[in-house]
Image (cartoon, rainbow, N blue to C red):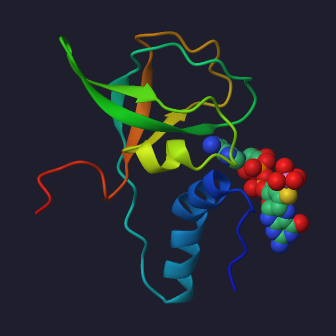
Amino acid sequence: MLGLPGNPVSALVSFLLLGEAALAALEGRRARPRIGYPLRLVEPFARRPGRPEFATACLVETADGLAAAIVGRGGSARLRPLAEADGLAEIAPNYAPVRAGDRVVFHPFATGRGLGL
Ligand SMILES: Nc1nc2c(c(=O)[nH]1)N[C@H]1C(S)=C(S)[C@@H](COP(=O)(O)OP(=O)(O)OC[C@H]3O[C@@H](n4cnc5c(N)ncnc54)[C@H](O)[C@@H]3O)O[C@H]1N2
Ligand code: MOO
């Protein structure tokens, strides 16, 4: 049995970060390591330092190339940002304030916008 937190964003983040690896270990296989890539943020993001944060984020095209925009104003009970997001933007535990142009590690969802192939 795998227990997850009760709020939808918490449940998804916990499952992707810990649950998949736990299931893989129980099944005797090796979990595929998650690949994240660095992207700049288009807007600042208000947060309290002290813990790593995985914020729901969308990919956006800018004049300087691909960037990330955090969607939703926090709150792990909110469903809409989860439905809109292309992935999670990882912010290091004590990194604050987060300014426009700062780099995050972007972890795309498998269902992110692509060619649909
Ligand atoms: N079986 C039960 N299920 C639920 C109950 C219950 O009593 N029994 N209560 C429901 C209610 S009411 C609520 S509210 C939620 C509480 O949900 P969580 O435990 O998920 O609480 P959170 O504060 O959202 O999250 C816990 C923990 O997860 C980490 N976290 C959350 N989001 C992120 C993020 N984006 N990046 C990094 N870490 C994150 C954080 O450490 C939080 O402290 O449960 C219902 N279900
Ligand atoms: O403890 Mo809750 O009631 O959904 O916020």
Q: Quadrant of residue 66?
A: top left
Front residue of this view, candidates 21 and 109? 109
100 relative to 73 in the view: left or right? left
Q: Is residue 106 shown left or right of residue 55?
A: left
- Compared to 58, does 32 lie above or below? below
Residue at image point 10% right, 63% down: 117
Q: Nearer the viewer, residue 63 or 19?
A: 63
Position of residue 114 measured from the top left corner of the image (x, y, whole percent): 17, 50
Q: Quadrant of residue 48?
A: top right
**Which residue occupies 66% across, 54% down?**
10
In the figure, 20 relative to 69: above or below?
below
Where's the N terminus, which quadrant?
bottom right
Q: Nearer the viewer, residue 67 or 77?
A: 77
Q: Position of residue 33 (x, y in %)?
A: 39, 60
Above/below status of 36 relative to 70: below
Whether residue 117 sits left or right of residue 90 in the image: it is: left
Image coordinates of residue 59 in percent, x first then y, are 31, 33
> x, y percentage for residue 60?
28, 27
Residue for point 65% across, 16% down: 96
Residue placed furthest toward the bottom:
27
Q: 115 or 66, which lies in front?
A: 115
| Residue shown at 51% from the left, 36% from the top | 90
Q: Residue furthest front?
A: 80
Q: Quadrant of ligand 1?
A: bottom right
The number of numbered discs placed on residues in the rendered structure image is 0
